[in-house]
Image (cartoon, rainbow, N blue to C red):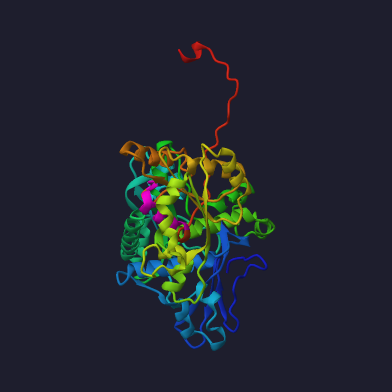
Amino acid sequence: MAVIPNGFEGQMPKGLELLNMGKVRNTFVLPDHPDKLLMVATDRISIYDFVLPAFVGQKGAILTAMNVFWRQFYGDQFRHDLVAHGAAIDEFLPEALRRNRELQAVATVIQKYGMIPVEAIVRGYLTGSSVKPYLSNGVVCGHRLPPGLHDGYELPYPLFTPTTKASVGHDEHISADSVAQEYGVWLERLALQAYMMARQYAIGRGIILVDTKFEMAKSILADELLTPDSSRYWGHQAWVEAQKNGELPPSFDKQYVREWGKTVGIDKLTDPDDPNQIATVHGLTVPQDVLDMTTKIYRYIFWRLVGQKLEHFQKDVMGIDREMPKVNVDIVLGSQSDFTKLVDLFNYGDHIASWHPFAAFFKNVKSHRIHIISCHRNPDELRQYAESLSDVDVIVAGAGLAAQLPGVLKAWLDHYGKSVPVIGVGFPGPNEEANTAACLSIEQLPGQPVELNGEGKAYFGKEGFKAALIQAVLGEFLPKKNVPKPAELNVLFSLEQFS
């Protein structure tokens, strides 16, 4: 069993025998179902094979829901071990454990299988642990690659790069040929097929499935599928921009925690079974802001891939009886004329028909306030608004013509340390040139600190405004900031500098 810090065992359903405690999941025996197991995903997190003394809020629920989603995505294409999820697990539990919404959110009933001791890893990009062997001899797990590749390079074809599945210590790379000799070629074939199906789906949602690991029984996909714990995800557009500069984009996984781990030397520890090294890690305190950001990252990638917030998926798909989260939204418009064109939207109120496409906003909004502040004519009022802002989850900011309001407001929020997301909306002007200017003033901000639509464009017009409001209550957001740039005052120069 993994060495778990004291007090971080996670949910332990009373009356069930613990069969195994892994780095993240606890497995329990089901007394009346000897051929099945109860798998409980905890909020624990591990990096560099060490379990940290910390919980990442909602992580277990996100992993469980993600597993359910991908198994439903594959349908009958592949066999898997999932028997029941959500409210349906009650059928297999003792009476005392039934109707427990928290347990339903993190537990699944799975079929018991003998697992193959191989991590079936598939890579579509050269990055992570594959870079070092490639730079050494051009070979990754028996695959010879062309010369001249760099970190983040899209491989000409996906590679099956298996590792051992060590019960103690680190997993080690092994060749694809040795796995085929031991278990047959089906394992590689199944892993590649499952990866390619998921990769094609993800890119359709603007996400790159960089690499992932599968665990299998005989022709069975088991354990976790394509979660942020077992997979590396990048935003496609972010990858395109990063590669122009020879960089990597941010990962939507636990890389954020790994980066913190590097600052305290966990990446330098070599033996996760050494009691002294374990004690060193277990004696650390993971900053709360690192844990909170990781929760946001996990929620964000779930939403990007699934298309629903976690709570909506739990209710609609997993059958868990729970309340939906409500969002406080502020609406900031640049002029009274903008509001006049939109005022009819807010006459619906709570009486809007459930079938109406705008119903999602009123159903999921907790409060919505409307402000009219011109960034040009009311600069100090806009500054004061940003400075005093509190209890707001999302801002929808819209303006016409040059549409500088969203960007200027975001800059003031950054100045005052407010990480509230701003969704930018451009409103129509007198001609097409004005319309183009309104959108570009939002889209072309350095670093894209203002939120855009799913196609990377500014929301536009009345329909775009409605879509932005729906996004405000149904979407997930990661903190964004303007790209820092130092001011330079009283600059001295000579003509020779520019010759």
Range of residues picked out in magenta: 456-472
Residue 212 seen in render? no
The answer to which quarter of the image holds residue 122 is bottom left
Q: Position of residue 414 (x, y in %)?
A: 57, 43
Residue displayed at 57% across by 69% down: 1
Return the x and y of residue 428 as percentages of the image width and height.
36, 44
Is 31 magenta? The answer is: no
Where residue 16 appears, x then y in whole percent? 57, 82
- Nearest the eye: 118 or 433: 433
Vertical arrangement, residue 445 with respect to residue 105, above or below: above
124 or 92: nearer the viewer: 92
Residue 84 falls left or right of residue 415: left
The magenta stretch spans residue 469: yes
Q: Is residue 476 visible?
A: yes
Magenta segment main secondary structure:
helix
Quarter containing the C terminus? top left
Query: What residue is rendered at 39% in x and 40% in y?
Result: 438
Q: Residue drawn 42% across and 76% down? A: 113
Compared to 443, does 258 lie above or below? Answer: below
Q: In the rendered image, which quarter is residue 136 located in?
A: top left
Question: Closer to the camera, 33 or 387?
Answer: 387
Residue 50, placed above or below residue 459: below
Q: Is residue 12 left or right of residue 74?
A: right
Viewer-proximal residue among 281 and 137: 281
Percent x, y of residue 293: 56, 54
In the image, taking residue 80 as reference, residue 50 lies left or right, namely right
